């Protein structure tokens, strides 16, 4: 019961707070330009609390699903006294009415700046040194000779202090030469390379930046084993993860390469292997530790075991996807994309980037040791996420093999980069706030426009039930999460109110601008009809959102 009351309180504070901010904007600007405000109400329905101060009645109503600022002469049917006429809303010049209407959404945009500042200031963020954990073979950094363990110091003269500085430095740098400075074993080096153009498709837009092929994290030493190979003869299997080589613990690929290089003629290996067992109709992955020995093979790295990295072997095929329909299976080795060889799983993501439904040729080596080639294309599918929302995604259906956890895995797990907690000061908090609010505003605007134009489904429009769920979940995650969610909803509220629909602020701004251009007021009959249409549309929109809430609950 107490938990339910806390959730209800979180919902009321969230929605009531956003409404208060919005209506405060209208109220303050109305007062500033000389318009008489009769009532300032947070919520609708019967009055819960209230008092009158000066000419304005301040009210807290029972239902916090909105609010309003009631101004003298706001509607064409309002009657005003001769004393109020000069202070009535409709009697004001167009620019004053537009300013009052814009003030509510403006406050809902400015409010998140303060909220995110409060969330960031004094908090800590985990930063990591720009030390390379692993590289993608066919991407520029690896081709330029950079190695795991190298520490980046500059990109085109831009200092790199933390790993997160690398994508920022590459934000506008792709398909042209850049100079990368780095240190290796205490010595400074420099190389010239050309970042690849990479498009990251989000739900609302594409983000483009330069890609070097660096990762902060080292990769686990997972094998890929071909039929008739020395590794296969020794008893190794695809997706075996190396735990020890000649008694030396192997945490990641870096350890593996060092141990294999130091080995003489024979290899004593311990690996962890995933065995699949059917339990009550469920296929469970059960780790098994296996010890075996084999002679060291010619070559360096994985070739010394007669194996190859397991990175390009298919770990999972999603049902009903293009990959499954094409006949791909777990354990198949990806070979080429449109005739060009591929060497890592990261390359698959790079090549899929921005292609959406465009077809391509994919070649692979099957478990039957035969080469296959087929034309494939991603398909648009719906994915259910938090709160049972459905989001459209482009899906091929291929997944890599993920490292699995066992007792042995924990003891010999991947070496993780050391975090450096950094306290966010006053100015940095403002800087981060001024970065995140415009980005969220742009993303929300694009998403809203796609919904209005029919490019995105309106099924994800949420009503009071969804807002309640979001408020409850964010409150459980802590004050910072709750305030951040409040800020994001504030931006949504601002943009929705700017839509040019009757009763919303956007329509008031539009009509005021139209009057300013035409130099005469709109007909009284037009105003009356517009208000009636707006009320009907608002009721229909709320009904649609509530219907969506009910459908999500029943899913």
Image: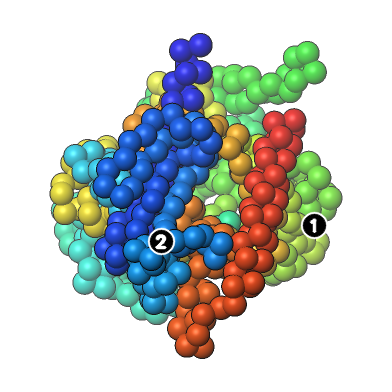
Along the line of sight, which residue is nearer the eye, 62 or 278?
Answer: 62
Q: Residue 78: x and y, percent?
A: 51, 60
Residue at 75% from the left image edge and 67% from the top image edge = 359
Q: Most extreme residue toward the bottom, as rendered?
A: 518
Q: Which residue is mark 2?
A: 81
User: Taking 29 as reference, is 289 above or below it?
Assistant: above
Mark 2 or mark 1, which has the lower sequence index?
A: 2
User: Taking 10 as reference, is 349 above or below it?
Assistant: below
Along the line of sight, which residue is nearer the eye, 86 or 249?
Answer: 86
Q: Most extreme residue toward the top, as rendered?
A: 1
Q: Residue 259: x and y, percent?
A: 38, 37
Say which quarter of the image contains residue 265. top left
Q: Tell me the SS state at disc 2.
A: loop
Q: Which residue is mark 1?
A: 372
User: Taking 438 as reference, is 13 above or below it?
Assistant: above
Q: Nearer the viewer, mark 2 or mark 1?
A: 2
């Amino acid at each position: 019961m107490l938990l339910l009351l806390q959730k209800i309180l979180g919902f009321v504070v969230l929605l009531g707070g956003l409404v208060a901010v919005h209506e405060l904007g209208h109220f303050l600007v109305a007062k500033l330009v000389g318009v008489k405000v009769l009532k300032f109400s947070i919520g609708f329905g019967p009055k819960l609390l209230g008092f009158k101060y000066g000419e304005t009645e301040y009210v807290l109503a029972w239902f916090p699903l909105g609010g309003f600022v009631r101004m003298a002469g706001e509607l064409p049917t309002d009657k005003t006294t001769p004393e109020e006429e000069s202070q009535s809303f409709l009697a004001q010049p167009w620019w004053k009415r537009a300013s009052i209407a814009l003030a509510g959404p403006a406050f809902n945009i400015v409010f998140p700046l303060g909220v995110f500042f409060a969330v960031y200031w004094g908090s800590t963020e985990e930063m990591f040194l720009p030390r390379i954990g692993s590289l993608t073979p066919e991407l520029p950094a690896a081709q330029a000779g950079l190695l795991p363990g190298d520490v980046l110091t500059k990109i085109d003269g831009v200092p790199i202090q933390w790993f997160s500085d690398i994508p920022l430095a590459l934000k506008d740098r792709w398909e042209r030469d850049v100079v990368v400075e780095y240190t290796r074993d205490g010595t400074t080096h420099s190389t010239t390379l050309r970042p690849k153009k990479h498009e990251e498709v989000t739900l609302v837009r594409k983000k483009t930046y330069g890609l070097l092929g660096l990762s902060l994290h080292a990769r686990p030493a997972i094998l890929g084993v071909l039929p008739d190979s020395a590794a296969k003869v020794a008893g190794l299997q695809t997706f075996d993860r190396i735990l020890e080589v000649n008694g030396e613990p192997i945490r990641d690929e870096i350890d593996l390469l060092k141990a294999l290089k130091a080995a003489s003629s024979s290899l004593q290996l311990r690996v962890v292997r995933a065995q699949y067992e059917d339990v009550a109709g469920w296929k469970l992955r059960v780790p098994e530790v296996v010890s075996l020995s084999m002679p060291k093979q010619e070559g360096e790295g994985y070739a010394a075991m007669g194996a190859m990295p397991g990175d390009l072997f298919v770990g999972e095929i999603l049902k009903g996807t293009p990959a499954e329909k094409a006949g791909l299976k777990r354990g198949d080795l990806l070979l080429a994309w449109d005739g060009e060889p591929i060497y890592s799983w990261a390359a698959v993501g790079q090549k899929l980037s921005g292609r959406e439904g465009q077809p391509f040729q994919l070649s692979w080596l099957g478990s039957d040791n035969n080469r296959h080639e087929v034309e494939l294309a991603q398909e648009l599918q719906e994915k259910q996420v938090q709160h049972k929302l459905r989001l459209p995604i482009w899906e091929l259906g291929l997944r890599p093999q993920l490292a699995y956890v066992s007792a042995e895995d924990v003891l010999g797990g991947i070496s993780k980069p050391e975090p450096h907690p950094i306290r966010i000061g006053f100015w940095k908090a403002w800087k981060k706030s001024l970065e995140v609010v415009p980005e969220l505003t742009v993303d929300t605007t694009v998403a809203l426009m796609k919904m209005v134009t029919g490019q995105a489904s309106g099924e994800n429009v949420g009503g009071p039930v969804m807002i309640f769920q979001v408020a409850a979940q964010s409150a459980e995650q802590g004050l910072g999460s709750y305030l951040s969610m409040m800020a994001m909803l504030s931006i949504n509220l601002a943009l929705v109110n700017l839509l040019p629909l009757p009763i919303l602020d956007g329509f008031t701004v539009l009509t005021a601008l139209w009057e300013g251009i035409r130099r005469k007021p709109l007909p009284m009959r037009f105003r009356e009809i517009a208000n009636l249409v707006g009320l009907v549309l608002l009721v229909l929109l709320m009904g649609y959102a509530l219907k969506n809430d009910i459908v999500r609950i029943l899913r």
